[in-house]
Amino acid sequence: MCGIVGYIGEQQAYPILIKGLHRLEYRGYDSAGVSMITSQQALNVYKATGKVSALEEKCSAEDTTGTIGIAHTRWATHGEPNTVNAHPHRSQSGNLSLVHNGIIENYKTLRAMLEKEGYTFHSDTDTEVLVQLIEYTQKSNKCDLFTAVQRALKNVVGAYAIAILEREYPDRIVCARKGSPLVIGVGTDAHGKKEFYIGSDATPIIEYTNQVIYLKDEEIALMTRQSDLPEIINLANVHQTPEMHTLRLSLDELEKGGYPHFMLKEIWEQPNALRTCIRGRIHVQAKDVLLSGIVDHKERFLNARRIIICACGTSWHSALIGKYFIEEAAHIPVEVEYASEFRYRNPVIYPDDIVIAVSQSGETADTLAAIQLAEQKGAFLYGICNVIGSSIARATHSGTYIHVGPEIGVASTKAFTGQVVTLCLLGLAIAKVKRTLSDEMFHTLVDELQTIPDKIQWTLEHNKDIDKFAQMFTYCRNFLFLGRGYNYPVALEGALKLKEISYIHAEGYPAAEMKHGPIALVDEEMPCVFIAPKRGMYDKVVSNIQEIKSRKGKIISVVTEGDKTVSDMSDYTFVIPDTRDCFVPLLAVIPLQLLSYYVATAKGRNVDQPRNLAKSVTVE
Ligand code: F6R
């Protein structure tokens, strides 16, 4: 939610800020703004509604000079997306400008206090309250900006990542974080002088430097032109030593690579992404699964009474598949919880429970809060994240990265399959520790899992014509997705993908649940997508298809290559190769991703940045 970029150095800041905003646009894209201090010490602020390109257009007629600046792309929380509410916000005197990601929960109280002190407000945002509060603190304490930010934030309840400029001191930027991510890049310019970059994540920074500092919660950082490293202090007044990390992210991974959209690129990347995810974790000769996150905590997993997985959205769907697999392979009961519900209950947690957070971004506020609650109750925390060094990855005791590379398209695709593969690896590794699978079965599963990347490649190549008939579905108002067993979560995921990018209403159900109500919806205008591989409950799914067909529903099916029965009953079929039941989701989801993509593009939707959504949901 919201993207922040900042720069201080000898280069012109504006091009760096704009490029950074484009890279962060997936985090929010309803309005954008920049602020630079010119060489004449003017603090300019420009804002526009809509995408970053609208801001660029606006700025083309403005003075955008300056070697220090901050910028923001917004996903509205307080106040509608318009230029007044867009960031950066200025302080009353015009001396400060500030960008913010997060939510200030006590902003109304702070605003009332500031109004009494004579401050006036132009926007509906919590952010404007923050910048005024900092200025008020600075004036009433007669202190520098760094100290004022630290003192002001002590009165703030909520989540924030902020970056601030001060007109009178064009040689410094102050930033701070709590609950929302912020990364500082430390680069060296052509003359050997240090320069600093700020980003909500590393994507706007990687082009310039791979040396980064992840600001921790309640830390405030000061970057000046005179220093080689940021000065960092926390809310408790303790100076912190900056911890430098080296990024292993390449610029190529962040670009579209010839595809029209990131989403399509990421769908096609899945074979390679999953090879990387598996690589080094399956020991081919010994036919063993090695996850360091487990090896280091073997006893925990051996004695675990229960696993609770907390996640949201697509990650929740992959967690459901993980539940089925871990229960089957490792014989541990697994509960899958919506993180947003879990965090506000008083869940029963035993000391020998393992709580797993599944999150692509590693920044989802609800998931982070859920594991923080679990930790307070004594649970051991395990993270399954994609973004290296993300908040959830750092908040957990151990974990496994899915290693599928940056996912930029807002609709999750390769992260879903990466999470499922990682959860299967986890299930196998626990099964090995607990000896719950026979050697033969263990080896069969390990062998089969390694064939999945090739089978996904096959699936992609054999379903290329989905784009041709996607046109026919653009007029549909509703869709049903149906599956059983391991394929019930695939039905949920297929429905979520379609609704989020095409805006067609879609629901996923366990196929057998239809007769308990939803079948009333079925008529000749209702497409029903069945995941019907020739495995497990095939005959039962065939009966479910029959029930829909006799109510004139349109049948779209995902079938195993060579299947005739379901194909003959279907209006359209997508083929997948045969695999074991537990790995079918990894193949069956591919045509559903393609279907959503092509229906949405045929409807002219912006698939990479669908309306009202953001990639990283850092607010609750
Ligand atoms: C859907 C989608 C979302 C995310 C959810 C959790 O395509 O991307 O439903 O899965 O917001 O995000 P992470 O996995 O980053 O915690």
Image: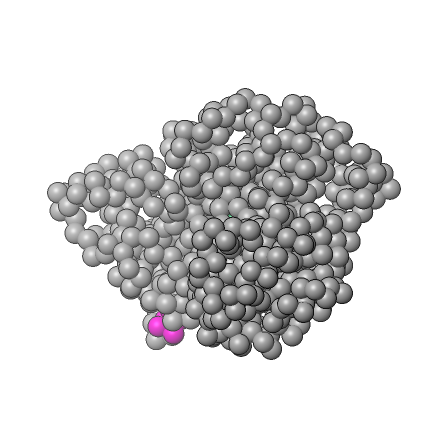
Q: Residue at x 49, y 71 (%)?
A: 524
Q: Name the spot of residue 228 as percent of width and height, x first.
A: 51, 45
Nearest the eye: 446 or 33? 446
Relative to 109, is 491 above or below? below
The range drawn in magenta is 55-59
Q: Name the spot of residue 265 as percent of width and height, x first.
A: 62, 65
The answer to whether residue 144 is magenta is: no
Point out the image quarter for the C terminus: top left
Position of residue 181 in the picture relative to residue 264 (left or right): left
Position of residue 456 in the picture relative to residue 121 (left or right): right
Nearest the eye: 15 or 127? 127
Q: Residue at x 73, y 64 (%)?
A: 563
Q: Name the spot of residue 419 as percent of width and height, x first.
A: 62, 47
Secondary structure predominantly adopted by residues drawn in magenta: helix
Asked whether the viewer can see residue 303, the reply is: yes
Displayed quadrant of residue 438: top right
Displayed quadrant of residue 408: bottom right
Number of marks drawn = 0
Nearest the eye: 437 or 179? 437
